Image (cartoon, rainbow, N blue to C red):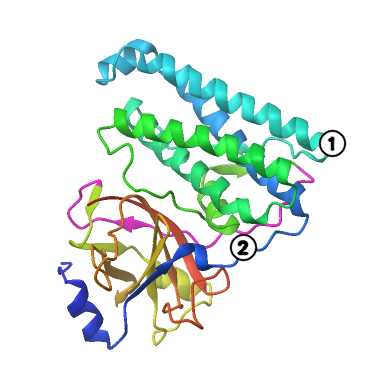
């Protein structure tokens, strides 16, 4: 049985401060290989999206979409999204020339139209966050402009699909930038293999599975918990934690980073969902597609979240405020 805790009592019981800080205060370092690595990073994501939409639109017909409750023109709009992703692949591969990686192989957990569209919403949100997070590391300003142009289209895709799912199309006044390894960790779960000779300078964190005790697909800001299933055992097996390690659930939403103490129960960690005025008056609540990692960082000035202190991630939560 998972108990419901309010954030104040949760933090007080640990004698640990819960904090929030702007996510854009983190330094962004270009990967080895510079802009070529960044372009191949983007190409990997576009390969993934192209394959995802190609398979989905081959497996499901326009009638299947209507039977699932989507409008008659929705299928045609998804074909436009696929065309956009194909254009992005062609553009990035052309810019890279002989430096372009070959397409990886992918597998997607899609069983029906609803799971296809649900995952498409997640992927478009991740794509937006990927381009946004990579922007400060791009040296060539013409590449930066092109990346910004693609980012804007990914964000349009995301809003359109969110609206079709009955979610808020614009849940946050800011999109959420993610780091290279955070995005690579999300993409890696769909990659079944890279072509021989592929050498990307990114790593995937140990996976993190988030479960809502209410079984709802949506979390509510300032209410309830998220359970991170088997996360302690996974981190212990990786040598990242011991039973005495203080662990924080780090939520990324818009330009905010929320540091929330995580409580261990057996092999799981549990953390409350931060809300408005957390941890201080005027702090916005997390909203929309929210990203979560586990870390040993507590959010103090000298101990902010980084790849080095991340022990697992990235989980994705849909949060309504």
Q: Which SS class for mark 1?
A: helix
Q: Secondary structure at mark 2?
A: loop
Report whether 124 appears left or right of 41. Answer: left
Q: How many marks?
A: 2
CA distance separating discs 1 and 2: 27 Å
The residue that label 2 is drawn on is: 28
Farthest right residue in view: 98
Q: Quadrant of the N terminus?
A: bottom left
258 w.r.t. 128: above or below: below
Residue 166, percent from left and from top:
25, 33
Q: Quick one: 245 or 88, which is closer to the camera?
A: 88
Can residue 194 be seen here? Answer: no
Q: Nearer the viewer, mark 1 or mark 2?
A: 2
Tell me where the magenta segment starts and ends, as one range.
196-217
Is 14 in the magenta?
no
Give residue 98's mark. 1
Residue 209 is covered by the magenta coloring? yes
Residue beneath the point at 53% across and 75% down: 309
Report the residue at 40% width, 33% height from top: 110
Sequence-wise, the earlier of marks 1 and 2 is 2
Instruction: Give the image location of residue 36, x and y in percent.
Output: 76, 47
User: Can residue 78 be seen?
Assistant: yes
């Amino acid at each position: 049985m998972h108990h419901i805790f309010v954030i104040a009592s949760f933090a007080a019981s640990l004698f640990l401060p819960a904090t929030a800080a702007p996510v854009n205060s983190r330094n962004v370092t270009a990967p080895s290989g510079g802009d070529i690595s960044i372009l191949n990073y983007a190409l990997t994501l576009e390969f993934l999206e192209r394959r995802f939409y190609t398979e989905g639109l081959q497996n499901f017909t326009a009638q299947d979409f209507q039977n699932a409750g989507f409008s008659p023109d929705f299928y045609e709009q998804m074909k436009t999204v696929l065309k956009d992703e194909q254009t992005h692949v062609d553009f990035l591969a052309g810019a890279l020339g002989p430096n372009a990686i070959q397409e990886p192989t992918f597998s997607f957990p899609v069983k029906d139209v609803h799971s296809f569209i649900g995952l498409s919403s997640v992927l478009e949100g991740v794509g937006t966050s990927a381009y946004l997070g990579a922007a400060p590391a791009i040296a060539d300003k013409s590449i930066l402009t092109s990346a910004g142009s693609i980012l804007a289209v990914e964000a349009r895709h995301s809003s359109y699909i969110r609206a079709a799912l009955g979610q808020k199309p614009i849940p946050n006044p800011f999109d959420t930038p993610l780091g290279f390894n955070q995005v690579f960790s999300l993409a890696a779960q769909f990659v079944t293999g890279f072509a021989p000779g592929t050498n990307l300078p990114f790593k995937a964190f140990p996976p993190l599975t988030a479960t809502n005790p209410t079984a709802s697909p949506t979390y509510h800001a300032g209410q309830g918990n998220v359970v991170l299933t088997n996360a302690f055992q996974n981190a212990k097996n990786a040598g990242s934690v011991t039973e005495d390690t203080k662990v924080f659930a780090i939520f990324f939403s818009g330009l905010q980073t929320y540091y929330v103490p995580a409580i261990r129960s057996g092999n799981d960690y549990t953390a409350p969902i931060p809300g408005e005025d957390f941890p201080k008056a005027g702090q916005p609540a997390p909203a929309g597609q929210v990203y979560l990692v586990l870390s040993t960082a507590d959010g103090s000035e000298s101990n902010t979240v980084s790849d080095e202190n991340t022990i697992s991630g990235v989980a994705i939560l849909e949060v309504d405020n």
